[in-house]
Image (cartoon, grey):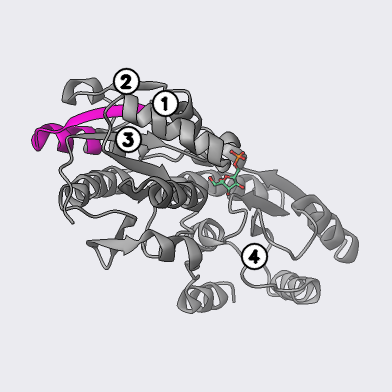
Amino acid sequence: MKRFIKKIAVMTSGGDSPGMNAAIRAVVRSCAYYKLECAGIYRGYQGMIEGDIVPMSARDVHHIIQKGGTVLKSARSKEFRTVEGRKKAHEALKKFNIDALVVIGGDGSFTGGMIFSEEFDFPVIGIPGTIDNDIFGTDYTLGYDTALNTAVEVIDKIRDTASSHNRLFFVEVMGRDSGFIALNSGIGAGAEEILIPEEDMGLDRLLDSLEKSRRSGKSSSLVVVAEGDKTGSNVFDLANYVETNLPQYDVRVSVLGHMQRGGAPSCFDRVLASRMGVKAVELLIDGETNKMVGVQNNEIVAVDLENAVKEHHKISAEMLRISDIMSV
Ligand code: F6P
């Protein structure tokens, strides 16, 4: 049954990512275009529970497309995991006459949105915003492209000093459960080895391969390690292990950390955010709920939120093959 939507709220939730502001802008401007009211919810589900909600018009989102972070702030809410918390949140939405919700975030945020939607028969659409690119149903999440470019820029700099001192560097990039950033920034920066949670290379193979590289005449080397990789217990232990077993190497570690989550979004992320924001509002107008907007083969699509949450975005075997060939 098609609902009559008059007012849509938008929020950002979970870990922030570059492009979230561009997506907020796109939702707000699409509402203005279709003559709908729009509201912004601060601090994700926690702000929803507390009624931290403001009206947003097309002019309120000027000059934010280029900004990193999120003007609506982000948070993780324990209270929203409880029925009481979600009831309070629903009351707040009713008080502000909100008929539908757009959640920009990752799978945790989508799970919350789905439960809320089912409990209160409330329309929810998700926009994937996370640098990890670990959401099923979309080729790219918002912020991933920017984070990749940040990582590559920094790894290039590390390469300069690694090469001056003939050193082996372990560079840890983000990706608690997924290796997209590591694999793609590693290929982009010409890393000798790339370690990701999806593929356990094993310590012996790593030592073998580094020893081969040294013998083949490479004077410096870079190993890009995803935060969630299981080859060592952490990147520092891994580096110690390698230095102990291959004493010819002078080893250093660099952890890139949260710098990967900040900064101005790339043009790719801005355009993707704009396309996704428009689609989210149009889905709600068409009476859809419990969908995530995704991009597949450069087409904007709607995917069931349930699938987006349950399934895994798999690393492509072809990319692993390319990285192997490149590190010869
Ligand atoms: O945004 C995703 C992510 O970057 C993960 O790769 C990382 O483990 C996590 O966020 C850290 O987030 P926080 O410091 O906000 O807990």
Q: Earlier in the sequence, mark 2 or mark 3?
A: 3
Q: Earlier in the sequence, mark 4 or mark 3?
A: 3
Tell me the quadrant of ligand 1: top right
Residue 54 image point, x, y percent: 32, 20
166 vs 88, left or right, is right
- Specify which label sits upstream in the sequence, 1 or 4: 1
Residue type at tag 4: Pro
Comparing marks 1 and 4, which lies closer to the viewer? Answer: 1
N-terminal-most mark, 4 or 2: 2
Residue type (three-letter) at the residue carrying disc 3: Val
Q: What element carries label 2?
A: strand
The amino acid type found where label 1 is placed reads Tyr
Where disc 1 sits, the SS reads: loop
Q: Alpha-carbon distance for marks 1 and 2?
A: 8 Å
Q: Name the residue under label 1.
A: 42
Label pair 1/2, CB-CB below 8 angstroms: yes
Left or right of residue 56: residue 147? right
Q: How far apart are marks 1 and 4 (CA)?
A: 33 Å
Q: Residue 54 carries which label?
A: 2
Q: What range of the chain is rendered magenta?
A: 27-42
- Density class for disc 1 (Cα within 10 Å; few <14, some 14-19, many ≥20) is many
Foreground: 230 or 264? Answer: 230
State the residue position of label 4. 197
Identity, as a three-letter code, of the amino acid under mark 2: Val
Quadrant housing the C terminus: bottom right
3D distance between C-alphas at marks 4 and 2: 41 Å
Residue carrying label 3 = 10
Q: Which residue is drawn at 46% across and 51% down?
A: 115
Is the residue marked by circle 3 packed among few (<14), some (14-19), or many (20+) residues within 10 Å? Answer: many
**In the picture, residue 200 is in which quadrant?**
bottom right
